[in-house]
Amino acid sequence: MCDEVQNIEEIECDDARTTRKGSYSAWLKKTKSDNARFKMLQSSTTRYFTIDFDSQMFFYAHSEKQKKMSLPISFRDILGAERLASATSNRKAKNRSSGFVLKTKDRNFELYANSAADAARWTFGLNAARDMGKANAKNGAVEKAKSADLGSAGVNAEQGQQEQASQQTSEADEAAKKAKEEKDRQRQQEEAER
């Protein structure tokens, strides 16, 4: 995402939702589901949400210090996230601009961030999580098929793992090369602007 944005100051490039590494946590307002017991008293609750790219889980807690995960969602169960359309003329228009919907296999969550920009970051991060979950599910199926093929051909699985590790190293080297080229390009651009 950092490479896709014209004005790099618009986003935080060390944010896990952007880098797809580590985790990011923040308070979000969650609209209660239709079958919530006390929805008539209060239509939303504030929860401390975490997107963890290392464990590939999205979850919330009732406080920052609480270790218990509520409703953990695997990345492979995320169907997608999208921003809420802004209302045109009512009081909720401001809130809706910072809202987004997370769709999972089991249910949908209507969530609100502190700003429209933060809602966009959450949406980007959750869709990146969905893509990672899909890729891992697909790779898992491919790996099982490769293992079966390797086994039937008399090739040991260790050789297949070595080939996979070599391919991953090659992909990591290519990504590092692209990142260095981008950094050099930005540095040259900055020097040219001076």
Image: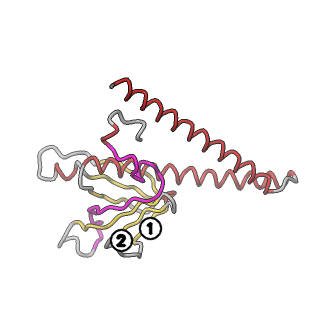
Q: Position of residue 4 (x, y in %)?
A: 41, 36
Q: Where on the picture, by quarter, is residue 156?
A: bottom right
Asked whether residue 46 is drawn in magenta, I would say no
Q: Left of 52 or right of it: where is 154?
A: right
Range shown magenta? 11-36
Give SS at disc 1. strand
Q: Is residue 165 above or below residue 182?
A: below
Whether residue 33 appears in magenta in the rendering, the answer is: yes
The numbered mark at residue 95 is none
Mark 1: which amino acid? Pro
Q: How is the image coloured?
A: secondary structure
Q: Position of residue 130 (x, y in %)?
A: 47, 52
Q: Position of residue 70 (x, y in %)?
A: 39, 72
Q: Is residue 162 left or right of residue 74?
A: right
Q: In terms of secondary structure, where does tag 2 sit? A: strand
User: Crowdedness of circle 2 by 10 Å Cα count: few (<14), some, many (20+)?
Assistant: many
Which of pointers 1 and 2 lies earlier in the amino acid sequence? 2
Q: Nearer the viewer, residue 181 or 194?
A: 194
> In the displayed structure, does residue 25 sit left or right of residue 105?
left
Cα distance between the residues tagged 1 and 2: 10 Å
Q: Quadrant of residue 140?
A: bottom right
Residue annotated with mark 2: 61
Total labels drawn: 2
Residue at point 16% right, 49% down? Answer: 93
Q: Which mark is residue 72?
A: 1
Question: Badge 1: few (under 14), some or many (20 or more) residues near its Cα, within 10 Å?
Answer: some
Which residue is found at the position 31% from the left and 52% from the top?
100
Residue at point 16% right, 53% down? 92
* Residue 136 located left or right of residue 188: right
Q: Position of residue 23 (x, y in %)?
A: 43, 59
Nearest to viewer (mark 1 / mark 2): 2
Please state, as top left, top right, bottom left or bottom right, where the N terminus lies in the image: top left
